[in-house]
Amino acid sequence: MSTRELDAAAITDPVLRSAYAHCRRLNARHGKTYFLATRLLPIERRPAVHALYGFARWADDIVDDLEDTAPPAERATALRRLQHHLDHALRTGTSSEPVAAALADTARRYDIDPQHFTDFMASMRQDLEVSEYPTYHDLERYMHGSAAVIGLQILPVLGTVVPREEAAPHAAALGTAFQLTNFLRDVGEDLDRGRTYLPGELLAAHGVDRGLLQWSRATGRRDTRITAALMAAAALTRDTYRIAAPGLAMLDPVSRPCIRTAFVLYGAILDAVADDGYAVLHRRAVVPRRRRATVACDGLCRLAAARLRHRLNGGGPPPPSPEPAGYTPPHLTYGVRRRPSPKEPV
């Protein structure tokens, strides 16, 4: 990790500096889109994001590494060990495991609710026990721990110009949108792991079941019913981005370029999936390098402008946000748009 980042974050203990550096390497190696966006954060906040990502990466590798042939019982044991390290680190502030040590330090510095980590671990254990989700409601309960709480964990690091609880639902929605994007992009790989994260009722609405998905994966052949189901999943994901969008303007202005860049790049994955004809069962959709570079340059320009406005403002309260106001998104029932009822959450 850049010593400038650690110095700016006032992380002076040699053991902790080494722990944060380990987390940064995990982020750089595995989370290319995420790491690129993190580079747009104020330098003193980057180590905390690396720690949060490093912990999520550690757990995810236990349950999802295709190259790891360990049986479920061994993976469950590894998760229990991780839970032990997490509990000890949050309780004492120390750990022999670098990722846990950095995470505990970040949680203390930014007053992150420990329940978010508990909920995350519960969803990780669920990955070893559940292979499909009959309804979107079932999937939402899983995504609360696996994705929504990631947004809630990072929110204190980003900072807000409104009370944190006002921004929290949008942060949670953004974490969910990112994961729904990954689910769509990785349908084929998840099938290889014995799982599908597309709700059964969404698939059934288009005449699709797991058997048809597996046939398409195995033979390389396409089916219009599968394409229709994947298009519905993409539309549902885009609606979730719309719920998240108003939260961008609620963030500290110097953090907005980072999250906006991630927002745009993950949305571009949906575009890449569509441009590739929804062939996600046969190959992974990739955002073109030129597109990634363009978005990153835009983020840098926005970051420079935000810092300039902050300096011109004397370092005091931020100026009004240039971000457009959000709007209430339409809801989606598996490809058929409908207006939400007055009692329906948005």
Image (tube, grey):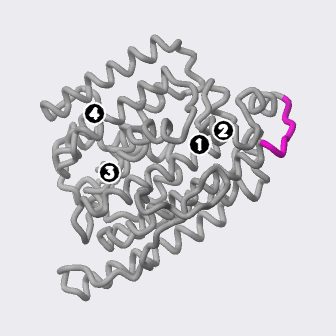
Please, which residue is most extreme toward the front here?
342
Element assignment for label 3: helix
Instruction: Tell me which residue sits at (48%, 27%) in the image.
Output: 127
Per the image, the residue denoted by label 3 is: 152
In the image, residue 146 above or below residue 268: above
Q: Spot the residue most to the left.
A: 92
Report if residue 187 lies within the magenta region: no
Q: CA distance from mark 1 to mark 2?
A: 6 Å
Mark 4 → mark 1, Cα distance in angstroms: 27 Å
Nearer-N-terminus badge (3/2):
3
Q: Are marks 1 and 2 in contact (CB under 8 Å)?
A: yes
Query: Where is 132 relative to 262, above or below?
Result: above
Mark 1 crowdedness (10 Å alpha carbons): few <14, some 14-19, many ≥20: many
Residues in magenta, as a range: 219-225
**Numbered mark located on residue 183 in the image:** 1
Q: Amino acid at mark 4?
A: Ala
Q: Amino acid at mark 2?
A: Val
Q: Earlier in the sequence, mark 2 or mark 4?
A: 4
Q: Are marks 2 and 4 in contact (CB under 8 Å)?
A: no
The structure residue drawn at horizontal position 35% and vertical position 45%, both measured from the top left corner, is 149
Disc 3 or 4, which lies upstream in sequence?
A: 4
SS for tag 2?
A: helix
Amino acid found under the numbered disc labelled 3: Leu
**In the rendered image, which residue does mark 2 sit on?**
187
Kindly identify which numbered label has been placed on residue 100.
4
Please tell me which of labels 3 and 1 falls first in the chain: 3
Dot 1: what SS? helix
